[in-house]
Image (cartoon, coloured by chain):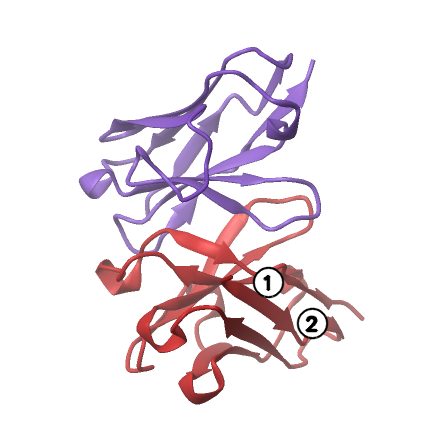
Amino acid sequence: EVQLVESGGGLVQPGGSLRLSCAASGFTFSRFWMSWVRQAPGKGLEWVANIKQDGSEKYCVDSVRGRFTISRDNAKNSLYLQMNSLRAEDTAVYYCAKTGGSGWLRGMNWFDPWGQGTLVTVSS
Amino acid sequence: EIVLTQSPGTLSLSPGERATLSCRASQSVSSSYLAWYQQKSGQAPRLLIYGASSRATGIPDRFSGSGSGTDFTLTISRLEPEDFAVYYCQQYGSSPTTFGQGTKVEIK
C-alpha cells in the first residue's frame, strides 16, 4: 500500500522556521516527482513546491520563493520542506503528495496519493 | 497563471440524485490536463479523475469527467451517502498547477 506520512508541523512565531518531513512507503520513491500542497484553514488547495526524482530540478510558487526549500533523500524515502521567515499567511495544513505518472511540464501532473497532512500555525 | 472557477459553490441534493459540477478555466488547459479530487472533512484530498476523463484506480463508475479547452464537468450519476463532500478541480497543463476553489455537495 502506498503511504505518505508527514511530520514536523506545529506552532511557530512569525519570522521563525520549521522543517516538515514526509516518509514514503509502498512504492519506489526515487522514480517520482514529489510535491508539497497546502490548505489554509477553511480554504482551498495551493501547490507549494515540487522536486524531480533525483533532486536536480525544484520549483515553487512565487509566494514562498526565497523562504521555503524543498529537498529529498531517496536513500531514506523521505521528502522535506524547510520553511524560513514564516508569516501568518503560511498557516495551513501541509500535504505531501506523489505526482502521478512521470510528470511533464516542470514535473506537473495529478497528485495521488496524498499524506494525511501536518498543521503549521504561524502566530505570536 | 490559469485561474479555475468552480460552480456552483454549494450543491444541495438528495441521495440517488445526479450531481453536475463545473470547472471553468481562464484560458485553455493544454491536452485536457485536468484532474478532480474529493475531500471529506478532516481528510486529505483523494484523486477521482485525471486527464479530464480517466478514472483513478478504485473509483466507482458513477463518477465521470468530461470537457476540454476551458470547460470541464464532473458528474456523479447517482449520489451515495459517502459522496457528500467538497470537490476540487486542478489543472496541470500550465505552470504553476492551480486548483479551483471547490464545490461542496451537501445533503438536501
**A84 relative to B24, above or below:** below
| Type of the residue with mark 2 | Gly
Q: Where's residue A63, x and y in %?
A: 48, 64
- Give the structural element (helix, strand or loop) at label 1: strand
Q: How packed is label 1: few (under 14 Cα within 10 Å), some, or many (20 or more)?
A: many
Please state which of residues A13 and B6 is positioned toward the viewer in this rendering.
B6
Earlier sequence position, callout 2 versus callout 1: 2
**B52 relative to A34, above or below:** above
Q: Quadrant of residue A62?
A: bottom left
What is the distance, in whole Å, between disc 2 and disc 1 at their CAs? 8 Å
Q: Where's residue B66, x and y in %?
A: 31, 26
Q: Kindly check if marks 2 and 1 are in contact, taking CB atoms under 8 A apart as contact.
A: yes
Q: Which mark is residue A94?
A: 1
Q: Where's residue A9, x and y in %?
A: 69, 72
Q: How packed is label 2: few (under 14 Cα within 10 Å), some, or many (20 or more)?
A: some
Identity of the residue drawn at 59% across and 28% down: B83
Identity of the residue drawn at 24% across and 38% down: B32
Identity of the residue drawn at 30% across and 32% down: B53
Task: Look at the image and give the colour of chain A.
Answer: red
Identity of the residue drawn at 37% across and 51% down: A110
| Residue tagged 2 | A9
- Give the structural element (helix, strand or loop) at label 2: loop
* Chain assignment, label 2: A
Q: Where's residue B90, x and y in %?
A: 40, 43
Task: Look at the image and give the colour of chain B.
Answer: purple
Please state which of residues A13 and B76 is positioned toward the viewer in this rendering.
B76
Residue projecting furthest to the left: B31
